[in-house]
Amino acid sequence: MTTRLTTSAMIASFADPGQKTTSAPFGHALVRLADERPEIVGLSADLAKYTDMHIFRDAHPDRFFQLGMAEQLLLGAAAGMAEVGLVPFASTYSVFATRRAYDFLCLDIAEPNLNVNVVGALPGLTTGYGPSHQATEDLAILRGMPNLTVVDPCDSVEIEQCVPALAAHPGPTYLRLLRGNVPTVLDQYDYRFVLGKAAELRTGRDVVLISTGLMTMRALAAADRLAADHVDVAVLHVPTIKPLDTDAVLRAADTDRLVVTMENHTIRGGLGESVAATLAFAGKGRGILPIALPDEFLAAGALPTLHDRYGLSTDAVVDRVRGALGT
């Protein structure tokens, strides 16, 4: 496989060359929501610029709160605001929200079931900075937390749609944020985000790709590539990791097709294991092909190179499916 060194590790961009993108969709969506709802507030742990929260800060400076590099304080303050009727969106990097502030998220927010929306940037392998900033295990950490809803959006379209849906949800949420210039893909599919629901974006008789997050755009691209080989590929997008749309998963996976799960997360504790458990609990045990990050600390480097190395690129997905089909 050809190694690509076209971007620096400093640039957290996973968009393919020439791909349509939208700038800071989360920040702009939050501003639009706040224009309509005065109880919306934004918080950050000294990372407003790097979580697109600066868009909200500039539009509503009186409703923005900078807590400094203290994620425990960030989530504790957000909990207090929710207790008095505000609807906080608290942004930081995913690694800090999950590893550093887990107990505050669990006991201050989830246990009292408060409407706090935790926004985690750099989920999975969306930065080249290495293990200190790569939140490759955040889904595994959070799936076991009661009351918490977990959302992994595909692109800018879904981010813009899910922001008001998360604010309207009465309990706590965790959003895996794609920031900066975010690819725009789902506008081609007449897509509407519905919290807790999966969406079949294309049908196919040979293979079904069950994907979440940015891997859905790779699933769609891989399906187009495989069609040239006369392989008919369905794509089921699963934006809500918890609660999982088990009915949609069972309809998609309980067939004679090759079932492939795709996620920007370690193979442990994410979508792949959730799909496997759903099948097993329903008495539909069968083999699935998981495409995910390995159970190891990942290297630092340029994102295109890392996505090739760890199997998240479209080329890598196409190769894995072809290999499984023996084509």
Image (cartoon, rainbow, N blue to C red):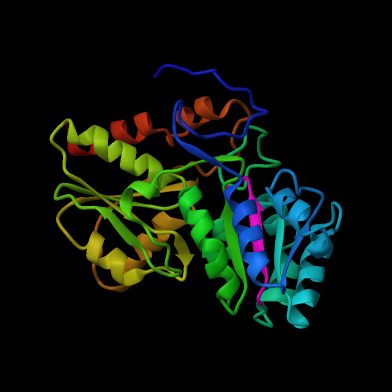
- Residue 53 in the image: x percent, y percent? 71, 52
* Residue farthest toward the right in the current orientation of the protein: 68
Q: Which quadrant holds the C terminus?
A: top left
For the record, the magenta segment spans: 115-123
Please count the marks in the image. Answer: 0
The residue shown at (56%, 67%) is 164
The residue shown at (54%, 64%) is 150
Residue 197 higher or lower than 311, as above or below: below
Q: Is residue 152 visible?
A: no
Residue 123 higher or lower than 163, as above or below: above
Looking at the image, which is closer to me, 134 or 23? 23
| Magenta region includes residue 5 | no
Looking at the image, which is closer to me, 33 or 67? 33
**Left or right of 259, for residue 102:** right
Quarter residue 29 falls in: bottom right
Q: Is residue 93 visible?
A: yes
Q: Which quadrant holds the N terminus?
A: top left
- Residue 295 in the image: x percent, y percent? 52, 44
* Residue farthest toward the front in the current orientation of the protein: 35
The residue shown at (60%, 77%) is 171
Residue 136 higher or lower than 37, as above or below: above
- Residue 7 in the image: x percent, y percent? 58, 22
- Residue 317 in the image: x percent, y percent? 34, 36
**Left or right of 140, for residue 67:** right
Quarter residue 35 falls in: bottom right
| Magenta region includes residue 116 | yes
Residue 317 higher or lower than 153, as above or below: above
**Left or right of 57, for residue 37:** left
